[in-house]
Amino acid sequence: MGQGDKNILWELAEQIGDELNYEVVDVVLTKEGPNRILRVFIDRPEGIGLKDCELFSQRLSALLDEKDPIPTAYLLEVSSPGLERPLTKPEHFQRFTGQGVELKLFSPIEGRRKVKGRLQGWNSQDGGQVCVEVDGGTLEIPWKAIAKARLKYMD
């Protein structure tokens, strides 16, 4: 999925999220076997239930049918982000400070392509940096260097 396509899908999902008062956490269009799957993860402070997913799915499906941004057949899945939720926005790194985190990087930083540690927050300087406590020290990882980030259960 190209960045332009991803932006369109995000915009459509966030339009429904704004209307229904849900946070859109992530939007992923993937291919699994012969099927294309559009996965949308939603959240709200009191949590997400099955009825929330059904309502969001119905509204988003109607909008996707109208706008037709995906030229091929696909399946739509709407769900909660789960306990090891993706972190896709700067405010996520602020909200979940103190919790375990796993970052996958585009290229190594200090010899690491994967960083696991305790999230120390977000630093807005220099385009944004994620602060992670690793091995007793703090790494400041540039936002643009992060390919994927998610909460990770830690003892």
Image: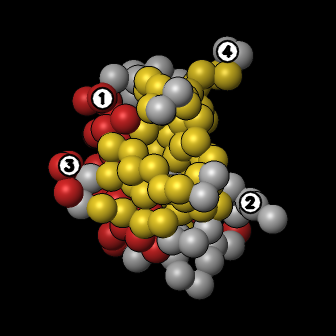
Q: Earlier in the sequence, mark 2 or mark 1?
A: 1
What is the secondary structure assignment of the residue under circle 1? helix
Mark toward the start of the polypeptide (2 vs 4)? 4
- The reply to whether discs 2 and 1 touch (Cβ–Cβ < 8 Å) is no
Q: Residue at x 71, y 16 (%)?
A: 33
Instruction: Mark 2 and mark 4 in contact? Answer it, CB < 8 Å.
Output: no
Q: Mark 4 falls on what kind of element?
A: loop
Q: Earlier in the sequence, mark 1 or mark 4?
A: 1
**Disc 4 designates what residue?**
34
Neighbourhood count class around disc 2 (C-alpha, 10 Å): few under 14, some 14–19, many 20 upward: few
Residue pictured at 20% horizontal, 49% vertical: 127
Three-letter code for the amino acid on which mark 4 is drawn = Pro
Instruction: Please determine whether, in this image, residue 20 is positioned above or below residue 72.
Output: below
Q: Position of residue 94 (x, y in %)?
A: 41, 70
Q: Badge 2 is on which residue?
A: 153
Residue 73 % position (x, y): 53, 24
Do the residues bearing badges 3 and 1 touch, measured as CB atoms within 8 Å?
no
CB under 8 Å between discs 4 and 3 = no
Task: Between label 4 and label 3, give the one nearer the viewer.
Answer: 3
Sequence-earlier tag: 4 or 3 = 4
Q: CA distance from mark 4 to mark 3?
A: 39 Å
Q: Is residue 53 left or right of residue 94?
A: right
